[in-house]
Image (cartoon, rainbow, N blue to C red):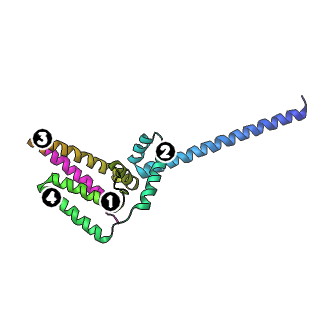
Amino acid sequence: MNTTLLVTIIVIVVVVILLLAIFFAVRRSRARRQEQQRQRSREEFGSEYERTARETGSEEEADKELRRRRGSVERSAEPLSDERREHFEGQWGEVERVFVDNPEKSIEMADRTVADILNERRFVTDSSQSDEETEKNLAAMHPDVADDYREARRIRADVVARSARTSDGDSEEQSTEDLRQTIGRYRAVYERLIER
């Protein structure tokens, strides 16, 4: 075998090995950066990240969707004026006063108050927007209270449906306790939404 040919083969083999090493190093570095980004997203969006990953079937898609949605909501969301904040504080005070005598009416008032704030702050961008879309908009901006909002709306619907079907005392006590928990969840959402 010719020495020149042997040197050429050795050089080609070394170059191929170096290229493979660089390829795998870059790939490992990219995977590490992606995992760090996913970890930041998990911390930032909490349970909403996991929910969105299940819906989209991919953590990468979940990250893209949540960031896209947050950007969209940030562009349209508006802060409350001091006057409107005071108005909603008065409205929430009424929710709590009514709860003592009429918990079911209070829960409806709480739902309406939170819905009014979501509308005013422009988390609802269109009158035909679904409740699910509103929940997703809230979750993109305030993932810490998104589960409270979903659970409050679910319990509210269950309690309203149950109270329409039953009228015995035990069910009423359970409904009142459900409503108390639901008011607490709505309060968490309310407080988050009226922050400056």
SS class, disc 3 = loop
Decide which of tag 3 and tag 2 comes sooner along the chain.
Answer: 2
Which residue matches tag 1? 119
Which residue matches tag 2? 61
Magenta residues, start to end:
173-196
Q: Are marks 4 and 1 in contact (CB under 8 Å)?
A: no
SS class, disc 1 = helix
SS class, disc 4 = helix
Residue at image point 13% right, 56% down: 100
Tell me the amino acid under the disc marked 2: Glu
Residue at image point 15% right, 48% down: 176
Left or right of 175: which side holds 65? right
Residue 49: % across, % down? 42, 46
Picture quarter with the C terminus? bottom left
Residue 99: % across, % down? 15, 56
* Gap between marks 3 and 2 measured at Cα: 44 Å
Left or right of 105: which side holds 40? right
Q: Are marks 1 and 2 in contact (CB under 8 Å)?
A: no
Which residue matches tag 3? 166
Seen from this angle, which residue lies furthest right? Answer: 2
Magenta stretch contains residue 117: no
Residue 151: % across, % down? 28, 47
* Gap between marks 4 and 1 measured at Cα: 23 Å
* Gap between marks 3 and 4 measured at Cα: 22 Å
* Gap between marks 1 and 2 measured at Cα: 28 Å
Q: Is residue 39 visible?
A: no
Q: Residues within 10 Å of mark 1 (few under 14, many from 20)?
A: some
Residue at image point 67% right, 41% down: 23
Which residue matches tag 4? 98
